[in-house]
Image: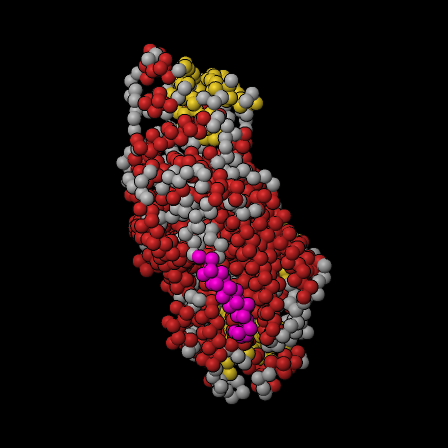
């Protein structure tokens, strides 16, 4: 056993993560691909899929900041997605914003409003745990949907609202949406990264593993959860705003849609719940694949079957998601390498307990 | 005609199944789409239909209507002497997918024209896309007022717009009946509710009073309270803004509540042919009315052929034809007539021509577009189920002969059950 | 002098009276043992003292301050660490991360800074070395053996340098070698001035390590004194009657 | 009078919602599974009964004799092949799996039945009993009786039988249950079987009172979930109370005010209840410390 004198000089043993070089390399490549994507594939069909992918990218990354890190699976984040959409549509007409660049200024506003709404909502739903929490968030989403239907004065009820679209030419129309989307998505990912490596993030992960234990170690679980909840809501608001601007019409049924959260969680799980990049990967793959299946299978209604089956397959083959699967591979590889060293000095109490 | 469903994509979609699993690969194969689908000769038309999700029922009927039209049109020399080829994509009833689909039609498949999807909700985003690429969007099943209130110049609805559909009946009421209380109930829907509200406004002006007025949410599954509210009002006339399937449930609840007004008219549901009679039972349909933009038996251009073709292709009888079928068919007809007149595939010319006030003929009757793109030429009909037959009863003095309106039978109030 | 004390604590669960008017004092700087037959209310007392349960009546004092209604995090921040009967660590986090959790920070900015600051890392490694888990620092805590998890739990509480540590059956399910090691750690830590309160059935262990032992019976204090007194006190035997005197696991 | 009528209808329909919710809440309680497929399964049940009535002219209530065991088997199948293999993150993984199952079922039904609306028929479906000015639709009365009967059976099974004991044990503490030698896997399998078997019955009633097609499931699921939270997870009695409470509120608001506010009113009440009792009306408070 090492003696206490040497400790402070010793650096933390590096964790079993894939080495920085490789990770940043991959990151840079991914980034480049995303930036060049719409320039290389300038076909609007593809860039449209790209825009939706970006919207889902920021949404799922935001969702993951709360649900992935704290382990509280929220299936009502469509509330904030919807708030973002309605805020955009309502304010655009209220402030008579002309269709064009100016509309993009509504993004920060929507983010702010979504975050604001998240505070009281969080205070209510974070009182419960596990399935009660899951179902409570779903119920909450239906309440908002009903409000959207019934407060016709503001929301236009079932008539919905419009965001009139800029008169830009089709060939370049998608680009601003794509790049603004990409920009927001990157902000989301960076935020997620900062949180993951912060003390705050560690507290969230502790809550995921054992909330009461975390509490007994001096972590203010309520505030931590609420903060994460609000942060994630902000990005959902941004996604909502982008969506409303891009699609141009807003309806209760589509803005507060239970399927939306299921898609988010599918993406997060496919990519790797609670990892930084996993959900983003999931978003790119699934939102892309899903739209692509529809335009590939044309009118065929086997779509649902293919989608459902594929989805079951993912859940069965990669229960942890893609990213963890990769890092596990790497891990076992490293462990094998280091086993010898560990064995060589395998005496002392730690090991005495280890192999039993 | 089945190119529409899979096209040459089908042959490749094994490869793509794998490819689809990477966003980049998506792009690559996606790029391949145009050259793969490009067919120089025929006139290609892109249509997004809802084959799954909330609108799947009507979505399929819509597709049938379009397919039959294409067959018919090709039998009549196609468009500009070129064969018509339809490309369908499913939008799973989601606006997100509608946006992608029409982008693909226009930018990847480079179709010559597009036609409208099912429902007002999907027509709005669809027409935005079409407008962006200066494509005309002719449609027959997206007539909600909000579609036309946006100042888009490229949307044209060949059917009578929502707002007028119940007015024919309202006019008749005002003319023949003395003012009395009327029971209203309508679904909260951008297409249906305006129909009822517009008729109500008209009747209120004529001194008819409101016995009860209920708006119910689209996702309602238990109609007994609404039905009993209407029943309790004891009104002799009931005007309902229903859609299938709630129209069926509503009738069932009326029967159970032993409520039978003299007149019962429903915004839609009774026009669904076999679906309707199967669901409520043929004996219970007696005397129920529904406004419609199409007469199955009419002699309007191509109608007889359409009915025959439908029965030949999909079976059933003349009453089993869903109202979406002629609405889609008509959209196709107007497109063909206009394009043939313009003499080119230019959407810009087409749009100008459609705005010129020119008249067209469709299976639903005359079509003429107002400035906002609604069909001002249409005179909505009212139909009534009489002894198991679906017969026109209004308007009086129209081109088609109509039977007299009968009061609602069987008397649900006295004989329990059907 | 008294560091941590409970005064006339009563706690009911429905019909059952888990604690009845229980009064106890634990001396500063001592290793206090807390024994008693199963269901005598030891763990409940721990829960009350650490804020997991609020008593129906009575009060808990820490250095004379009333902490009866404090929440677990407040109690911990005040300097009272606690382990659980069934060890509770953070299985999906690595050992080193586990040891960082208890390190206290204040203010939002501090919260947002990286989770392992140099000083924190030093302290974390120190405590890991102290219990001898440094080699396993990068392993997910869930993969540790039961005994190692107990040591880890012990270690990550140490990091926060609590004034007093409440150990709930530290010996339970731990093999002899490890138990000896653990005993040694406790003694060593105690020399640096940390007070211990240990609930334990393993009499050998308790008698071997404690300088003060309190006995609980049916939810209240029976008596307290030096181990050897307790060992052969008839009342204690009475209390334990019918229950196995030495439940060495 | 109208309000009274609404209350009666609320109670009658509530009974049948309770039946559908009972399966959901049981599965919740025992297995930590949010059975998101319940809606699709109910529609499946409806279609099965529909086919039997159409092709073999069997009375819908009789058709249950065939559909219920079939669906129960399906439930067990789902457990063995889809739920049991899930190791990590059970709650959510199972929820997502169930969602996938729902999608699959919807797709298949959509192809088999071609998404036109249908309704199950029997000669007496439109009859109703009249007492004074009040009106009792026969089908609702029958379904209420059936539901009441089945719920009491369920109650008997859970509280008076050996299986029930092990079931409640696995609800309260799976670990301990396993320790005392209860085969929790078997219990779970049977529970999911029962839960989905009930969906067959619920489906039949749904199909006789509503016209439906493959995508009708979405209208059902939200209500059932809400009923289950309000009643408290795992509490069949709670589900019954909550369901009736919910339907009565909705129907009364619908007649005195407007249907569009019916469900809103209910959701608001749900929120209020949960603010006071996060675990729902009859839910057990999760004991977490230690």
Q: Residue furthest right?
A: A95
Picture residue at 54% right of the left edge, 62% below the top: A54
Vertical comparison of A307 with A221: above or below: below
Counting every numbered tag in the picture gives: 0
Vertical comparison of B241 with D273: above or below: below
Q: In the rendered image, which quarter contains the N terminus of chain D?
A: top right
Decide which of A19, D20 is in the foreground and name it: A19
Expressed as whole percent of the image width and height from the top left, the position of residue A53 reads: 52, 63
Please check the rendered image and state whether residue D133 is part of the magenta-colored stretch, yes or no: no
The reply, left or right, for residue A319 in relation to residue B50 is: left
In the rendered image, which quarter is residue B150 located in? Answer: bottom right
Picture residue at 53% right of the left edge, 53% below the top: A193
Picture residue at 48% right of the left edge, 87% below the top: B41
Expressed as whole percent of the image width and height from the top left, the position of residue C25 reads: 48, 18
Please check the rendered image and state whether residue A21 is part of the magenta-colored stretch, yes or no: yes
Q: In the rendered image, which quarter contains the C terminus of chain D?
A: top left
Decide which of D127, A332 is in the foreground and name it: A332
In this figure, which colouring scheme has been used for the structure?
secondary structure
Expressed as whole percent of the image width and height from the top left, the position of residue B47 reads: 51, 73
Q: Residue furthest front?
A: A5
Q: Which residues are magenta?
A: A19-45
Asked whether residue B230 appears in the rendered view, the answer is no
Vertical comparison of A212 with A84: above or below: above
Asked whether residue C183 appears in the rendered view, the answer is yes
In the rendered image, which quarter is residue A242 located in? Answer: bottom right
Picture residue at 45% right of the left edge, 74% below the top: B29
Secondary structure of the magenta portion, mostly? helix
The reply, left or right, for residue B162 in relation to residue A351 is: right
Expressed as whole percent of the image width and height from the top left, the position of residue A137 reads: 52, 47
Vertical comparison of A331 with C241: above or below: below
């Amino acid at each position: 056993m090492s003696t206490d004198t040497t400790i402070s000089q010793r650096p933390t043993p590096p964790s079993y993560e894939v080495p920085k070089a490789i990770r940043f390399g991959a990151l840079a490549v991914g980034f480049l691909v995303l930036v060049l994507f719409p320039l290389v594939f300038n076909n609007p069909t593809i860039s449209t899929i790209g825009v939706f992918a970006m919207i889902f990218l920021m949404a799922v990354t935001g969702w993951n900041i709360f649900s992935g890190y704290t382990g509280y699976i929220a299936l009502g984040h469509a509330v904030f997605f919807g708030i973002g959409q309605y805020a955009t549509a309502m304010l655009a007409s209220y402030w008579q914003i002309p269709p064009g660049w100016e509309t993009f200024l509504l993004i920060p506003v929507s983010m702010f409003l979504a975050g604001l709404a998240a505070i009281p909502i969080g205070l209510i739903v974070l009182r419960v745990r596990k399935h009660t929490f899951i179902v409570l968030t779903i119920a909450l989403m239906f309440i908002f949907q009903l409000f959207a239907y019934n407060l016709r004065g503001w929301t236009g009820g079932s008539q919905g609202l419009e965001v009139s679209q800029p008169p830009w030419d089709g060939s370049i129309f998608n680009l601003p949406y794509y790049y603004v989307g990409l920009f927001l998505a990157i902000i989301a990912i960076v935020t997620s990264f900062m949180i993951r490596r912060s003390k705050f993030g560690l507290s969230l992960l502790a809550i995921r593993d054992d909330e009461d234990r975390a509490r007994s170690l001096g972590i203010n679980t309520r505030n931590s959860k609420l903060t994460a909840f609000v942060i994630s809501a902000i990005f959902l608001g941004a996604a909502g705003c982008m969506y409303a601007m891009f699609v141009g019409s807003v309806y209760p049924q589509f803005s507060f849609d239970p399927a939306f959260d299921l898609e988010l969680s599918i993406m997060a799980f496919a990519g790797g719940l609670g990892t930084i990049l996993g959900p983003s990967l999931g978003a790119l793959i699934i939102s892309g694949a899903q739209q692509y299946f529809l335009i590939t299978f044309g009118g065929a209604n086997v779509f649902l079957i293919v989608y459902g089956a594929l989805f079951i397959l993912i859940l069965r083959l990669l229960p942890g998601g893609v990213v963890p699967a990769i890092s596990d591979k790497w891990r076992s590889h490293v462990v094998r390498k280091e086993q010898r060293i560990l064995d060589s000095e395998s005496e002392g109490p730690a090991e005495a307990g280890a192999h039993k | 005609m089945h190119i529409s469903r899979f096209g040459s994509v089908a042959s490749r979609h094994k490869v793509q199944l794998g490819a689809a699993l990477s966003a980049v690969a998506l792009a690559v194969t996606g790029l391949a789409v145009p050259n793969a689908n490009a067919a120089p000769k025929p006139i290609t038309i892109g249509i997004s239909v809802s084959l799954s999700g909330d609108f799947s029922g009507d979505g399929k009927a819509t597709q049938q209507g379009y397919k039959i039209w294409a067959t018919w049109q090709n039998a009549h020399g196609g468009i500009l002497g070129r064969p018509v080829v339809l490309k369908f994509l499913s939008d799973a009833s989601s606006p997100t997918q509608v946006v992608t689909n029409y982008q693909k039609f226009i930018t990847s498949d480079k179709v010559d024209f597009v036609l409208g999807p099912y429902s007002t909700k999907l027509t709005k985003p669809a027409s935005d896309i079409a407008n962006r690429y200066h494509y005309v969007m002719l449609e027959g099943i997206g007539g909600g007022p909000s579609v036309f209130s946006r100042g888009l110049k490229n949307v044209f609805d060949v059917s009578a717009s929502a707002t007028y559909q119940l007015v024919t009946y309202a006019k008749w009421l005002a003319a023949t009946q003395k003012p009395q209380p009327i029971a209203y109930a309508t679904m909260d829907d951008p297409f249906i509710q305006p129909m009822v509200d517009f008729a109500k406004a008209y009747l209120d002006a004529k001194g008819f009073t409101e016995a009860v007025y209920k708006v119910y949410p689209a996702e309602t599954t238990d109609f007994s309270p609404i039905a009993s509210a209407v029943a309790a009002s004891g009104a002799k006339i009931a005007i309902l803004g229903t859609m299938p399937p709630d129209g069926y449930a509503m009738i069932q609840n009326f029967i159970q509540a032993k409520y039978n007004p003299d007149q019962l008219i429903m915004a839609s549901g009774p026009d669904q042919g076999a679906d309707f009679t199967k669901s409520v039972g043929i004996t219970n349909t007696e005397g129920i009315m529904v406004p419609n933009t199409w007469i199955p038996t009419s002699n309007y251009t191509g109608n007889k052929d359409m009915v025959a073709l439908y029965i030949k292709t999909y079976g059933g009888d003349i009453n089993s034809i869903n109202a979406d079928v002629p609405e889609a068919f008509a959209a196709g007809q107007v497109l063909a007539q206009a394009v043939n007149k313009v003499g080119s595939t230019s959407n810009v010319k087409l749009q100008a021509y459609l705005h010129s006030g020119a008249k067209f003929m469709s299976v639903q009757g005359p079509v003429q577009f107002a400035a906002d793109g609604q069909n001002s030429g249409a005179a909505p009909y009212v139909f009534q189920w009489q002894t198991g037959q679906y017969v026109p009863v209004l308007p009086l003095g129209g081109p088609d002969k109509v039977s007299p309106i009968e009061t609602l039978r069987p008397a649900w109030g006295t004989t329990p059950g059907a | 002098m008294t560091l941590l004390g409970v005064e006339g604590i009563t706690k009911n669960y429905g019909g059952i009276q888990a604690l009845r008017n229980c009064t106890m004092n634990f001396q500063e700087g001592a290793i206090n043992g807390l024994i008693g037959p199963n269901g005598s209310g030891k763990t409940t007392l721990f829960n009350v003292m650490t804020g997991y349960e609020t008593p129906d009546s009575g009060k808990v004092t820490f250095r004379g301050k009333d902490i009866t209604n404090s929440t677990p995090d407040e109690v911990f921040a005040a300097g009272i660490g606690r382990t659980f009967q069934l060890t509770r660590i953070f299985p999906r986090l690595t050992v080193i991360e586990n040891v960082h959790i208890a390190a206290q920070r204040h203010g939002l900015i501090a919260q947002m800074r990286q989770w392992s600051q140099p000083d924190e890392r030093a302290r974390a490694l120190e405590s890991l070395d102290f219990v001898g888990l440094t080699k396993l620092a990068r392993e997910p805590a869930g993969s540790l053996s039961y005994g190692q998890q107990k040591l880890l739990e012990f270690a990550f509480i140490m990091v926060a340098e609590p004034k007093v540590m409440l150990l709930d059956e530290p010996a339970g399910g731990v093999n002899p070698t490890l138990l000896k090691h653990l005993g040694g750690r406790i003694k060593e830590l105690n020399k640096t001035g940390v007070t211990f309160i240990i609930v334990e059935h393993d009499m050998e262990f308790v008698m071997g390590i404690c300088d003060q032992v309190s006995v609980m019976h049916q939810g209240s204090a029976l008596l307290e004194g030096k181990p050897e007194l307790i060992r052969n006190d008839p009342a204690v035997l009475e209390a334990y009657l019918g229950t196995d005197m030495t439940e060495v696991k | 009078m109208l309000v009274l009528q609404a209350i009666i209808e609320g109670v009658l329909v509530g009974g049948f919602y309770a039946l559908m919710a009972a399966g959901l809440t049981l599965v919740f309680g025992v297995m930590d599974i949010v059975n998101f497929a319940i809606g699709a399964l109910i529609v499946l049940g409806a279609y099965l009964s529909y086919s039997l009535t159409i092709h073999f002219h069997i009375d819908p209530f009789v058709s249950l004799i065939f559909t219920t065991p079939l669906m129960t088997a399906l439930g067990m199948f789902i457990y063995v092949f889809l739920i049991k293999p899930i190791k990590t993150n059970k709650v959510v993984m199972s929820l997502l799996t169930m969602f996938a199952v729902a999608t699959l079922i919807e797709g298949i039904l959509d192809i088999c039945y071609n998404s036109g609306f249908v309704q199950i028929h029997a000669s007496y479906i439109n009859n109703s009993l009249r007492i004074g000015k009040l009106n009792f639709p026969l089908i609702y009365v029958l379904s209420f009786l059936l539901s009441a009967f089945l719920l009491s059976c369920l109650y008997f099974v859970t509280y008076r039988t050996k299986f029930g004991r092990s079931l409640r044990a696995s609800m309260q503490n799976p670990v301990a249950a396993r320790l005392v030698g209860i085969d929790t896997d078997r219990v779970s399998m049977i529970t999911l079987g029962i839960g989905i078997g009930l969906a067959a019955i619920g489906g039949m009633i749904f199909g006789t009172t509503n016209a439906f097609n493959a995508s009708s499931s979405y209208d059902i699921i939200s209500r059932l979930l809400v009923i289950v939270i309000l009643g408290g997870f795992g509490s069949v009695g709670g589900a019954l109370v909550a369901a009736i409470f919910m339907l009565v509120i909705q129907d009364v608001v619908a007649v005195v005010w407007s249907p569009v506010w019916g469900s809103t009113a209910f959701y608001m009440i749900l929120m209020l209840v949960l603010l006071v009792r996060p675990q729902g009306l009859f839910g057990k408070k999760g004991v977490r410390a230690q």
